[in-house]
Amino acid sequence: MFGFLRTYVMLAVAGSAAAVGGQAAGYGAPQLVTYVWAGQGLIGVVALWGWTDLADRIRSGDVVTDLLRPVHPVLGYLLPDLGRAAYALLTRFVVPIVVGALAFDMYLPQRAATYPMFAVSVLLAVLVCFAGRYLVNAAGYWLLDTRGVLMGWAVCAGVLGGLYFPIRFLPEWAAAAVYLGTPFPSVLQIPLDVLVERDPPAGQLGLLGVQALWAVLLLAACVLVQRRAERRLVVQGG
């Protein structure tokens, strides 16, 4: 139902722009339809919300068993998450696409190179989202209650990630600031921009570069935070 509501809102925006002879921030109506329904599927692939495994284990103390395993905790959580994302891609991503295609006129990529670039973009989105969720959960090493941090992540990921509306709807300077200054567009907005071919090929490659940069920075931050957290556990006698 949420997908239908968003689609009709986007079609109204595209219709208003077409009435004055333009496009809605460079998106045509079929592109916005694909944006909405592919975005509905990507939510499950990247697991945008609801992951509290690490925070729960920190709260219960079970996290100490993770530290005894011969695998770094970040890698130990990342590999299962990649498997979960692959399964979700085959199940939760396909269904919204089929529903959207049956109900609306959707945009299909016109350039062959877009398909592998979209696959790479989805993989990078999964890595960025995992790293963000890991950092949010790792706040549990210092906080007794992480619900506020989790809520902050959910709000920012939805608004700044392009879930409710494309970030390109913002003024150009604000959109650039969100793209380059925060990791949230790398989770949803950029894969969807690549899929609907909002930009020329060079622009698509630039977006992939932004995603790759955020993935490296956030995963490095996960390793650093985990190291500091283990030091804190030792100080507390854990």
Image (cartoon, rainbow, N blue to C red):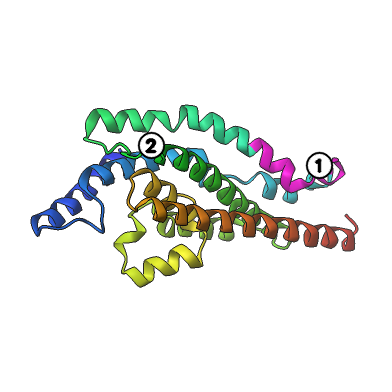
In the rendered structure, which disc, 2 or 1, sits on the residue that comes first in sequence? 1
Q: Residue furthest right?
A: 237
Side of 84 where 165 appears, left or right: left
Q: Which mark is residue 181?
A: none
Which quarter of the figure has residue 165?
A: bottom left
Residue at 83% x, 42% y: name it. Answer: 65
How many numbered markers are drawn?
2
| Mark 2 surroundings: few (<14), some (14-19) or many (≥20) residues within 10 A | few
Tell me which amino acid carries mark 1: Val
Give the magenta part as a residue range. Answer: 65-80
Of residues 62 and 223, the one nearer the viewer is 223
Residue at 41% x, 29% y: name it. Answer: 94
> Which quadrant is the C terminus positioned in?
bottom right
> Which quadrant is the N terminus positioned in?
top left
Point out residue 195 in the picture as x, y percentages from the top left corner. Answer: 38, 43
Point out residue 185 in the picture as x, y percentages from the top left corner. Answer: 45, 56
Q: Main secondary structure of the magenta part?
A: helix
Residue at 51% x, 47% y: name it. Answer: 48
Circles 2 and 1: CB distance less than 8 Å?
A: no
Magenta residue check for 67: yes
Mark 1, residue position = 71
| Mark 1 surroundings: few (<14), some (14-19) or many (≥20) residues within 10 A | few
Vertical order, 172 against 35 (above or below): below
Mark 2, residue position = 112
Separation of residues labelled 2 and 1 (CA atoms): 39 Å
Which quarter of the figure has residue 203?
A: bottom left
Q: Residue furthest bottom?
A: 173
Of residues 3 and 109, the one nearer the viewer is 109
Side of 104 where 236 appears, left or right: right
Query: Circle 2 — which element?
Result: loop
